[in-house]
Amino acid sequence: MKKRANKYQKKHHGIRNVIFLIFSILLITLIVYGISAVLNRGEASGSNSKVPQTSSRSNSNRKTSSSGQSETTGPTQKWLQSKTDNELPILMFHYASSQAADLAGGSNWMPDSTLEADLLALKNAGYTTVTSEQAIKIMTSHTKPSNKMVWLTFDDGSLTLYRDVFPLLKKYNMHATGAIITGFVDNHQSGILTWEQIKEMKASGLVDFISHTVSHLDLGTLSTADATYQLQQSKKELDSELGQDTNIICYPAGGYNQETIQIAKNLGYSYGIIDPGRNGAVAKEATASDGLMTLPRFRMASTTGPSLMMSYVSPATTFNEQNTMK
């Protein structure tokens, strides 16, 4: 009986050993599998964590264009140092259109195809189109974003700035400044921009806006009171509508006198751009010695194509290259 019991215990002890061995193997397998899974998740997590970092680096060199598409841009450009005052070509446009009826309106009406050819020529030649703020910095400091720089200005706040010019600025990622006649906008005058269109263009970062007075009257012929109203009211409205401090006046028809300049300064204007051919103004590149309230421009007429335009901007480029500190 005792032998049978020992035999029974040995048999079951052997079974327990087998079960324990199987259980141990299963346990080790589960542990190994668990460790492997954890490691794989860690690697996946590490891999995924790198994606935002790469994306972030990429996005730091991108900006959202006014069309809603992102476009690659370089890092912030360090401005060049100049030995003396810079020279800046300021181009004076009015209207660009693809419509035949518009183009019958005179020399201020440039075909949009001509404007596009001009912009493309500047782009291909490596020119920087500056903002009004950059233009002032160029005029008041011995620094510049490039030796090849130009300021594109469009007078009168025509609807064509939104309809025909703005798409070209987006296409070539270039900047322009619009001179707004605030009374025309307020009165919803035909062929004139609306405040909504002006705000849309400003929000794009491709267009900024300066004063062209309330009614586009020759300031040089007005009484002190009338000139004050034209300058003060236009600045007040631009500041209010666009959330800015308007400090540049584009004199309508190039009309001004010394009293006009003093009134403008008293009201907070610090810079002015004029019309070549009016008040004895000569078409030339602008420099600080011209006087910050009377910066000259080049008139861009309906027939001003790339060849003539480049003859306007090239001399300043040559001067700026020679004026750059090494």
Image: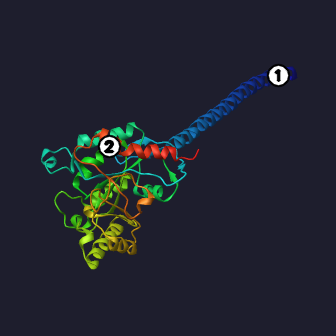
On the image, numbered disc 2 is attached to which residue?
309
Residue ranking furthest to the bottom? 225
Q: Nearer the viewer, mark 1 or mark 2?
A: 2
**Position of residue 41 measured from the top left corner of the image (x, y, whole percent):** 61, 35
**Position of residue 133 measured from the top left corner of the image (x, y, whole percent):** 43, 58
Q: How is the image coloured?
A: rainbow
Residue ranking furthest to the front? 280
Q: Is residue 101 visible?
A: yes
Front residue (pair 320, 96): 320
Front residue (pair 53, 71): 71
Q: Secondary structure at mark 2?
A: helix
Q: Secondary structure at mark 1?
A: helix
Is the Cβ of the residue at disc 1 closer than 8 Å to that at disc 2?
Answer: no
Identify residue type, mark 2: Met
> Which one is earlier in the sequence, the residue at label 1 or at label 2?
1
Residue 311 horizontal side relative to residue 48, left or right: left
Q: Is residue 146 visible?
A: no
Vertical side of 297 occupied by 211: above or below: below
Vertical side of 207 occupied by 266: above or below: below
**Position of residue 207 measured from the top left corner of the image (x, y, whole percent):** 35, 54
Q: Is disc 2 surrounded by few (<14), some (14 to 19) or many (20+) residues within 10 Å?
A: some
Residue 164 horizontal side relative to residue 106, left or right: right
Residue at image point 27% right, 70% down: 220
Q: CA distance from mark 1 to mark 2?
A: 108 Å
Q: Is disc 1 surrounded by few (<14), some (14 to 19) or many (20+) residues within 10 Å?
A: few
Identify residue type, mark 1: Lys
User: Which quadrant: the C terminus?
Assistant: top right
Front residue (pair 141, 68): 141
Front residue (pair 186, 19): 186
**Position of residue 259 measured from the top left corner of the image (x, y, whole percent):** 33, 74
On the image, numbered disc 1 is attached to which residue?
10
